[in-house]
Amino acid sequence: MAQHTPSAERPKRVALLGSTGSIGTSTLDVARHLPHRVEVVGLAAHSRWEQLAEQCREFKPAVAVLCDAEAFARADRTQFPKGTELLHGEDAVRKLVTATETDVVVSAVVGAAGLNGTWAALDAGKTVALANKETLVVGGPLVTELAAKRGAKLLPVDSEHSAIFQALTGHTAADVSKVVLTASGGPFRGKRAADLEHVTPQQALKHPTWQMGPKITIDSATLMNKALEVIEARWLFGLTADQIDVIVHPESVVHSFVEFADGSVLAQLSPPDMRLPIQLALLHPERTGGPAKRLNWQELRALTFEQPDRETFAALDLGFRVARDGGTTGAVLNAANEAAVGRFLSNDLAFLDIARCCRAVLDAHDYEPRPTLERLLKLDGWARQEVASWTRTRTATR
Ligand code: NDP
Ligand code: MG
């Protein structure tokens, strides 16, 4: 086997959108460990300016962006290093991701708010390391068509999709019989609907294997995260909904399976640590030692699998429905879910209401098979309003 020699290439210049979040800080940890391979040229956050300033003092990017106008007005400029230009708003995000200095854009904003920056990066032909799965849920075919048209690489950060991407190396979708996404099952694995009617946000926020931002942690508890990942896989790898399956794997060590046409199955294994798929997406196709945890072969015992409980975790089937129907359904499901998760976190909706409400909004919308991006963004706003009125009706009848 060839001896690994450190790359002689210059570092990848990275613009990081969502730098203050869970994926953002893990990305910076990769950069911290591999300064000769990763150079941070730009950082963007929404409103946590103190944390952004601290990151700027450490990584000295040329540009830092605060998307929120109020936070930008409040931010103490003296906390930012002299060489960092502090900018504000969506135009600044566009400027950052399209700059000639930027090689790779890490898309790690949470929710549909991540679509703009991802779109601008792909439109400029940049390589995008995509954590923001909502971009593909909302605009799947438009996003992948744009990437293809501009010759932009779209590399998955989501651990399941990174696993599939790695297993697919050297193959095309035509070689694939099916992909099986693994799911931890979240904090409520094994519970029935009757046990979940009154669970609190605090209980739902306790994930057994992954440390993540609050929105995706709730999505993991409802299995909506897996639903969104089914849709993400459908568009990212050009699969049909029938080629995608989900299996519960509580240890979160196998990150997904690909079954090929000849019946051979490839999987990717590693401890649950997002720094590995992030590093892979940043340095692709290079593999080098990094900060991610490694499997401890002395401690490894059983890896277990079970079928998901689709009745209790009704969100999962909504993902398959959207993967099958496409069109406007992804934008509607995503916005309804974002709004319903917000309502659950503020104690205005019950846990099981999240999936009920999402289904009701999907059922109520005017389906179109080939919507434009503008139409999808309008529907996003409409779906959020529908959740507001669904919540009002629900509260009145409770
Ligand atoms: P967090 O909530 O931890 O972080 C979100 C980041 O986005 C923060 O930097 C936040 O800034 C910024 N942000 C929030 N709203 C806006 C907005 N309107 N405009 C611009 N920036 C905004 O989320 P995660 O890191 O957990 O998740 C990020 C994405 O990665 C999600 O799409 C998630 O599904 C995906 N993902 C996450 C995984 C994980 O392990 N966390 C695993 C796989 C995928 P501020 O701090 O200033 O509010
Ligand atoms: Mg995932």
Image: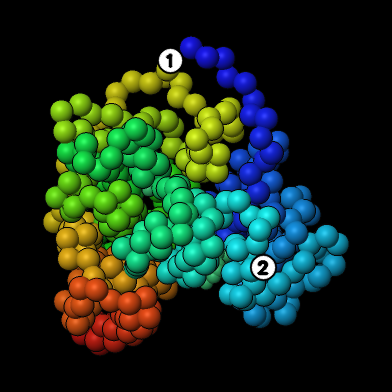
The yes-or-no answer for disc 2 within 8 Å of ligand 1 is: no
The scheme the figure's colours follow is rainbow
For badge 2, the amino acid type reads: Val
Q: Nearer the viewer, residue 351 or 222?
A: 222
Of the numbered discs in the image, which one, if any, rests on residue 17?
Answer: none
Q: Position of residue 117 (x, y in %)?
A: 52, 66
Q: Is residue 347 visible?
A: no
Separation of residues labelled 1 and 2 (CA atoms): 45 Å
Above or below residue 244? Residue 118 is below
Q: Position of residue 159 (x, y in %)?
A: 40, 43
Above or below residue 84? Residue 186 is above
In the picture, residue 46 is in which quadrant? bottom right
Residue placed at 31% from the left, 31% from the top? Answer: 267
Q: Which of 58 and 357 is in front in this view?
A: 58
What is the secondary structure assignment of the residue under circle 1? Answer: loop
Residue placed at 46% from the left, 21% from the top? Answer: 296
In the picture, residue 4 is in which quadrant? top right
Residue that carries the numbered disc 1 in the rendered image: 298
Q: Can residue 150 be seen in this view?
A: yes
Residue that carries the numbered disc 2 in the rendered image: 65
